[in-house]
Image (tube, coloured by chain):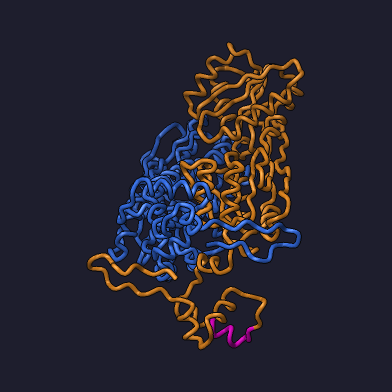
Chain colours: A orange, B blue
């Protein structure tokens, strides 16, 4: 039970006490155990419909809300699934995935919370998450190591699932390797006859986990061919776009994979303003298949990403929680396809 | 302490037990109370530096992580600040605000979690949040009513802060009324000599809380003038944009506030494709001051929003937690200014 502290601020009225399951039991005329069975929907114990109704009515009248932490202390584990909250803006696609995942997990009676871990990294973040004693932890991106996984498991997490480029010892892995995105883009530009290929690498912090594998993917796609790959650091400002476009002809590039559609729009504008023809002189391809890219003239070519289904991931979590000793599963889940429009 | 249940899955190895503060006390050769004082940084009790070090080393060796829920059960309240996780994609501006807020709260020793409340609304959501026994709850948008606030307070929340268009009984309010955004846009278009003004109302679910006050703001700005206001429902697809542009001349509008920059880019493209001059025949203004709007030709006029500082909000939360009996504070925090470019 959470008690409001006994020393209220000066001048504060005496706080009302928080209703407990004992209060509910008293009002309903049943035992505390019965209250617990009814409100936690325990199927192992048969309780008559009238008793069930009496408990629910008493809980409603008193405004009683079960306490997740106390319940998990009793049960030995929580139903809390923890994810770090994203620290960079998430697009529509990823947002939909997260919504679907949360919805599917809540249908399985889990509570999903996103932990605001700004400024915490790797195993340090894992310790902060462990304090909430989640039953499962989902970690997008890189950064969590085997030590962090061990801290979480020692603190009672029955499943740790990473969504990133690599597997981590002790954790289930949904492999989301962004190399495939760069690979598709590089291959496409090569097939369109381009040989001197630039790759935009955003200077914004937090994007390295995506930009580096995308760059590596372009390199991998063109290895052993006669094409060259040039990385192009770029900030997300008009001025930076203009500066890059101003030295474009020096660079001698005939194509660019611009990291994503937003950077592609920025760079296309700057190239057109410099009188550089797209796709005539330089082919441009982005990624993410944003609606806005279709509005560009020339219409923007892009790499469309396909994320795993939130429902499948929810089922993996539930399976892992039920059988924490099972060997970690690994699934490749990121797919990518080129959407060829006019800019490449 | 969280215990791994005693009946592991068939074939599972015997689970290692979770280290407790008693284990730390034993290894360090001190009392459990001393462990608690040291690890919770209690300033009320003086503990020698060597003892402090011994406790930290023992905790590290055992991989002991304090249990937030157990600690809050002892302390009588948690340090958990809860927010509902956003269910629509958040832009860069709002994302930065949330990051800054989380950072500032963690500096004040709070843990911020975003609760995945997909599918839960109003007071029903409040009950789900209450189960985690947060010490403070921050609720963006509308939907939480006085009943929900009461449920949260009865469950031990010392502060409930809404960030929305209206105050709610019992809660502190940061008034973020999007009417001001529409008001600025409507006034601007009127001052540019426009009189037949359309307002885009997105058909996407989840945006009503923003689109309706923006529409009302345009109406308020033009009340008592000779201008007319026409609401224009619009889906976020190329086809919907083209359909609206095809009947543009029937509508007889000479200006449009397009809800935000993304819808403004969609509609501008469709209008230009129909041969309708922007701004000659129709002035267009968006909102959010996206970088991409500057890349349009004509460059997109926009309404720039200014959110409160995350640090100020963190301080309000801390003040409210320390003095839960203080009268609710109300602050107007949303500012908006027109950035006039070429499209209006």
Q: Would you say residue B279 is visible in this rendering?
A: no
Left/right placement of residue A215 relative to residue A193 reads: left
Q: Measuring from the top left, give residue B123's x and y in whole percent.
A: 48, 68
- Quadrant of the rendered image containing residue A18: bottom left
Q: Assign the C terminus of chain A to one quadrant of the image.
A: top right
Which one is nearer the viewer's eye here, B306 or A7? A7
The majority secondary structure of the magenta stretch comes to: helix
Magenta residue span: A47-56
- Please, is residue A48 above or below residue A88 in the view? below
Most extreme residue toward the front is B29
- Residue B104 to residue A186: above or below: below
Return the x and y of residue A210 as percentages of the image width and height. Answer: 61, 34
The residue sitting at 65% across, 30% down in the picture is A214
Q: Is residue B327 left or right of residue B218?
A: left
* A268 or A62: nearer the viewer: A62
- Residue at 55%, 29% (x, y): give it: A202
Is residue B75 toward the left or the right of residue A338 in the image?
left
């Amino acid at each position: 039970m959470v008690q409001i502290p006994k020393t209220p601020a000066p001048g504060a009225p005496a706080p009302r006490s928080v209703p407990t399951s004992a209060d509910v039991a008293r009002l309903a005329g049943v035992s505390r155990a019965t209250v617990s069975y009814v409100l936690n929907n325990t199927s192992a114990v048969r309780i008559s419909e009238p008793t069930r109704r009496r408990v629910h009515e008493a809980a409603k009248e008193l405004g009683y809300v079960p306490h997740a932490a106390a319940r998990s202390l009793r049960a030995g584990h929580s139903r809390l699934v923890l994810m770090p909250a994203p620290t960079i803006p998430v697009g529509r696609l990823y947002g939909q995935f997260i919504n679907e995942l949360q919805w599917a997990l809540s249908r399985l009676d889990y509570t999903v919370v996103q932990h605001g871990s700004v400024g915490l990294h790797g195993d340090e973040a894992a310790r902060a998450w462990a304090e909430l004693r989640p039953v499962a932890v989902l970690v997008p991106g890189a950064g969590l190591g085997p030590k962090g996984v061990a801290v979480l498991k020692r603190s009672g997490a029955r499943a740790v699932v990473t969504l990133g480029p690599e597997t981590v010892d002790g954790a289930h892995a949904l492999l989301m390797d962004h190399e495939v995105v760069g690979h598709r883009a590089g291959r496409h530009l090569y097939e369109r006859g381009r040989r001197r290929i630039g790759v935009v690498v955003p200077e914004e912090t937090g994007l390295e986990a995506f930009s580096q594998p995308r760059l590596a993917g372009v390199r991998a796609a063109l290895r052993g061919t006669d094409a060259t790959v040039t990385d192009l650091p770029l900030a997300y400002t008009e001025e930076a776009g203009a500066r890059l476009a101003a030295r474009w002809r020096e660079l001698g590039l005939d194509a660019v994979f611009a990291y994503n559609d937003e950077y592609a729009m920025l760079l296309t504008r700057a190239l057109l303003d410099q009188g550089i023809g797209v796709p005539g002189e330089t082919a441009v391809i982005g990624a993410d298949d944003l609606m806005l890219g279709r509005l560009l003239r020339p219409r923007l070519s892009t790499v469309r990403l396909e994320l795993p289904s939130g429902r499948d991931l929810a089922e993996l979590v539930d399976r892992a929680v039920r059988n924490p000793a099972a060997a970690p599963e690994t699934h490749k889940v990121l797919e990518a396809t080129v959407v060829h429009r006019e800019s490449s």
